[in-house]
Amino acid sequence: MVNFKSLDIKALGDLMASIGETRFRASQIYRWMWKRGVTSIDEMSDISKKAREKLKELGYVGELKLKAYFPSKDGSVKFLFELEDGKEIESVFIPDRDRKTVCVSVQVGCPMGCKFCATGSLGFTRNLKSWEIADQVLQVQKFMRSFLNQPDLRITNVVYMGMGEPLVNLDEVKKSIYTLNSHIGLNIGSRKITVSTVGIIPGIYELARFDRQVKLAVSLHSAIQSKRAQIVPVAKAYPLDKLRKAIIQYYEQKKRWITFEYLLLPGFNNSEEDIEALEDFVSGIPSKINVIPFNPYPGALFRAPTDREIEKFIKRLQKLPHTVTLRASKGRDVGGACGQLAKFRPTELILNTEN
Ligand code: SF4
């Protein structure tokens, strides 16, 4: 039995042709699944009864199972989803005025082992399939519509910043972007989609050639090679000088500003020397620097910066000719903030009883 959500339009067209239907029917099914969120083949009312019966013999419309959700005081909601093989992943809904963002996971665990990251400390289990990535957005949208009693609520932005490294699962990530971007899918503009990487150089070049104008965010955290390699193990294979070239190429190709994520780890990467190295690294790259105060989790190697440390760091960075933003990490109280996914569980969780 095939999960029809795992098929793209072409494969769905082949399937329809194999049961004697026109390929055109594929877009109708796609729309039912990805735009309207329907899982029952019987509800696909513009497909003939005969074709629906045949479809039911061949497969089904799968969906992620919502196991629990954790609403934060700041309006964000963390979700725990179960996959068909029983593995679990997390996603986060982040509202900000008209912008409704979903942060998606791309892997179960993560093989990168970054030293400041709760997900990285869990190890790696498997890559997600494209439908499992896109379905996080669909399920969050469906849930939030009823949770907030806003039937017209639409997810406007997607960030690939949850569990896992997107550029080591790039084929599936690209396919999921097609689904999110499709006008018969979730219809989210490619410019509203951000792919974040810890610095996988071949992946950056490949994403530069990808035919969707997605934004690139690079988790930099230190512009000093020896320091960066201490906290981001993959930096040994992909050093800063080569990473910089790949980022410039991405900008040249896409003409889209790059976002540099800089996790503020007090006592590690906030000295004058660190700032000067950062200044050199970003110089000449149209970009913004997003400073994220570290969110400790149980067993973390770093502590949170104090307000004074944050303020001092930001003030110094503001002397650079770059836009500097301070990301107020949302979902901190429910373990949904950056680098917290997968390890910390709040004590008050709300189990989903609808499934
Ligand atoms: S920061 Fe990203 S790439 Fe690094 S271990 Fe965590 S999830 Fe993986």
Image (spheres, rainbow, N blue to C red):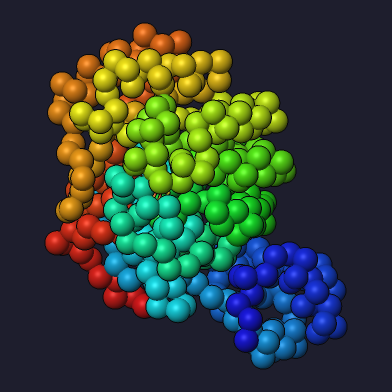
Q: Nearer the viewer, residue 74 or 8?
A: 8
Which quadrant of the rendered structure holds the C terminus?
bottom left
Residue 207: image location, x then y, percent: 64, 43
When the figure is inspected, residue 323 is found, relative to residue 224, above or below; the finding is above
Quarter assignment of residue 256 = top right
Q: Nearer the viewer, residue 213 or 39?
A: 213
When the figure is inspected, residue 228 is found, relative to residue 147, above or below; the finding is above
Q: Nearer the viewer, residue 281 or 21?
A: 281
Q: Is residue 44 visible?
A: yes
Residue at 59% over, 81% down: 60
Residue 295: image location, x then y, percent: 23, 42
Quarter assignment of residue 352 = bottom left
Which quadrant of the rendered structure holds the N terminus?
bottom right
Q: Is residue 189 visible?
A: no
Residue 113: image location, x then y, percent: 37, 53
Residue at 34% over, 40% down: 230
**Number of numbered discs visible in the structure rendering:** 0
Residue at 60% over, 77% down: 3
Residue 18: image location, x then y, percent: 82, 82
Q: Is residue 354 left or right of residue 18?
A: left
Q: Is residue 264 left or right of residue 16?
A: left
Residue at 63% over, 81% down: 2
